[in-house]
Image (tube, rainbow, N blue to C red):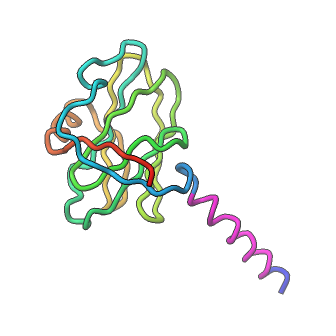
C-alpha cells in the first residue's frame, strides 16, 4: 500500500511541473497582425532572429501552440501564423505546448543569424528548417502577437 501511495504522490507532484516545463501556467490570447514587425524590417546586428511558423494547422480547429524561449512565453501560433523574436548569442531552449503535449528543441544562436522553426499539431512536432524552406513557409503565414488574459 505504501508503494502505491508513493507512486501516486510522485505523479501528483510531476503533473504541475510538467505543465510548467515551457513557462508559467497562464492564459494567452492571440491576434493576427497585417504588418511586419520592426525586428523583421531592421534585423539587429548584435542578436539573432528566430521565426516560429505554423504553416498548416487550419485542420486543427484553431488549437493554440504556445512557444517559450528559455521558459518565458515568446509567442502563440494559431492557424497559419508566425511570430519572430530576437535571441541573444548563446544556447536557448525553445519549448512548444499544445494542450498537454510538449515538444522542445535547442538552438545555439549566433548574432546576425536567422533561424526558422516549424511547429505542427498533427503530429505534434517542433523542428528547425533551413532558411530557404523557412522563407517559403513564411509566405503561407500571418504574423501574430499575444497578450496574457
Q: Residue furthest right?
A: 2
Along the viewing direction, whichever of 146 and 80 lies nearer the viewer = 146
Quarter of the rendering containing residue 129: top left
Would residue 91 be found to the left or right of residue 1 on screen? left
| Residue 15 within the segment the image draws in magenta | yes
Task: Please tell me how many numbered marks the rendered image carries.
Answer: 0
Residue 113 spot, x, y in % from top left = 35, 21
| Residue 67 within the segment the image draws in magenta | no
Determine whether 70 is above or below 81 in the image. Answer: above
Residue drawn at x 38%, y 32% as measured from the top left: 85
Would residue 48 be found to the left or right of residue 7 on screen? left
Residue range highlighted in magenta:
4-19
Residue 125 spot, x, y in % from top left = 36, 54
Residue drawn at x 31%, y 24% as measured from the top left: 39
Along the viewing direction, whichever of 115 and 149 lies nearer the viewer = 149
Residue 73 spot, x, y in % from top left = 47, 44
Q: Residue furthest bottom?
A: 1
Residue drawn at x 85%, y 82% as measured from the top left: 2
Quarter of the rendering containing residue 107: top left
Quarter of the rendering containing residue 36: top left
Would residue 68 be found to the left or right of residue 63 on screen? right
Would residue 71 be found to the left or right of residue 54 on screen? right
Q: Quadrant of the C terminus?
A: bottom left
Q: Quadrant of the N terminus?
A: bottom right
Determine whether 6 is above or below 139 in the image. Answer: below
Q: Residue furthest top?
A: 45
Residue drawn at x 27%, y 17% as measured from the top left: 42
Residue 56 spot, x, y in % from top left = 21, 54
Q: Main secondary structure of the magenta part?
A: helix
Amino acid at each position: 500500500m505504501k508503494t502505491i501511495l508513493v507512486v501516486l504522490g510522485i505523479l501528483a507532484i510531476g503533473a504541475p511541473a510538467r505543465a510548467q516545463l515551457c513557462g508559467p501556467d497562464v492564459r494567452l490570447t492571440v491576434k493576427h497582425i497585417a504588418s511586419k514587425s520592426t525586428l523583421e524590417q531592421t534585423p539587429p546586428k548584435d542578436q539573432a532572429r528566430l521565426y516560429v511558423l505554423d504553416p498548416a494547422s487550419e485542420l486543427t480547429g484553431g488549437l493554440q501552440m504556445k512557444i517559450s524561449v528559455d521558459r518565458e512565453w515568446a509567442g502563440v501560433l494559431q492557424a497559419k501564423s508566425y511570430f519572430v523574436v530576437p535571441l541573444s548569442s548563446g544556447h536557448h531552449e525553445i519549448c512548444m505546448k499544445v494542450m498537454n503535449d510538449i515538444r522542445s528543441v535547442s538552438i545555439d544562436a549566433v548574432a546576425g543569424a536567422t533561424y526558422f522553426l516549424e511547429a505542427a499539431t498533427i503530429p505534434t512536432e517542433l523542428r528547425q528548417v533551413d532558411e530557404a524552406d523557412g522563407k517559403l513557409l513564411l509566405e503561407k503565414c500571418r504574423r501574430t502577437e499575444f497578450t496574457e488574459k
